[in-house]
Amino acid sequence: MDKTRVYANLKPSRTPGPKHASPPSFPSDACWCPRWHQWALKFCCAILLLFGFIGFSVLVRFLIQKCSVDVQANTTEATGRPALSQCSRDWHSHHDKCLYFFPASRPWSEGLSDCSAKEATLLLVQDQEELMFIQDFTKTKGQSFWIGLNYISSEKIWKWINGSIVKVKGENEQDSCAVVSQDKVVSDICSSDNHWICQKKLKPV
């Protein structure tokens, strides 16, 4: 006999008897779980979801970091050199240099010391293009700036502070240092007051 149909067609008996008759028994294969079992099952599911979310978050973070490393590696490979960091605040970038234009006017020797304290040097003009860049900047300021070039009277030569020698036409005076003005490079007495330009190399990240 089909048990399902039997329980579906059960009707109240018309036979006189107690009003509160016992309910019919369920099939032997039916399963009843206590309420706390249901709550335990829900709790376990919530824990599994939580761990799954945490694992997913860690995976996403790992993939983002890996992507960042890959992009940096591709940039390095494409340019043939490491990515360069930005210049510090108040420093101006120009090619592979950071330039600092000192706002006050002091003697050349103080400019030399100040740049050294900043882990930099007085400007060493690399080429004509860089000189034009500096002159364009000085025009906006209307000021003259010391650079890292001075006259060595004992050797009677003009020399950059890195030891490179420069041939200069005209008369040479003792205690002379080079200044970049708005349209040319001129000599001035090193004890005079001028602004100055410090330079430092951009460092790889």
Image (spheres, rainbow, N blue to C red):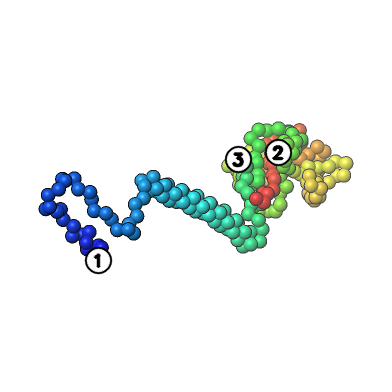
> Which numbered tag is attached to residue 141?
none
Q: Secondary structure at mark 3?
A: loop
User: In terms of sequence position, does the residue under pointer 1 or pointer 2 come before the other?
Assistant: 1
Placement of the N terminus among the 4 image quadrants: bottom left
| Residue 42, horizontal then vertical, whole percent | 40, 48
Distance CA(mark 1)–CA(mark 3)? 87 Å
In the foreground, 140 or 80: 80
> Is residue 179 in sight in this rendering?
no
> Which numbered tag is attached to residue 89?
3
Residue 36 placement: quadrant? top left
Distance CA(mark 2)–CA(mark 3)? 13 Å
**Would you call the spot at circle 2 few (<14 residues within 10 Å), some (14-19), or many (20 or more)?**
few
Residue position for label 1: 2
Q: Amino acid at mark 3?
A: Arg
Residue in view at x 85 percent, y 41 percent = 153
Q: What residue occupies the far right of the structure in this picture?
A: 154
Q: Secondary structure at mark 1?
A: loop
Q: Secondary structure at mark 2?
A: loop
Q: Is residue 27 left or right of residue 127?
A: left
Q: Is residue 41 left or right of residue 197?
A: left
Distance CA(mark 1)–CA(mark 2)? 95 Å
Residue 200 placement: quadrant? top right
In the foreground, 193 or 1: 1
Residue position for label 2: 118
Residue in view at x 16 percent, y 56 percent = 11
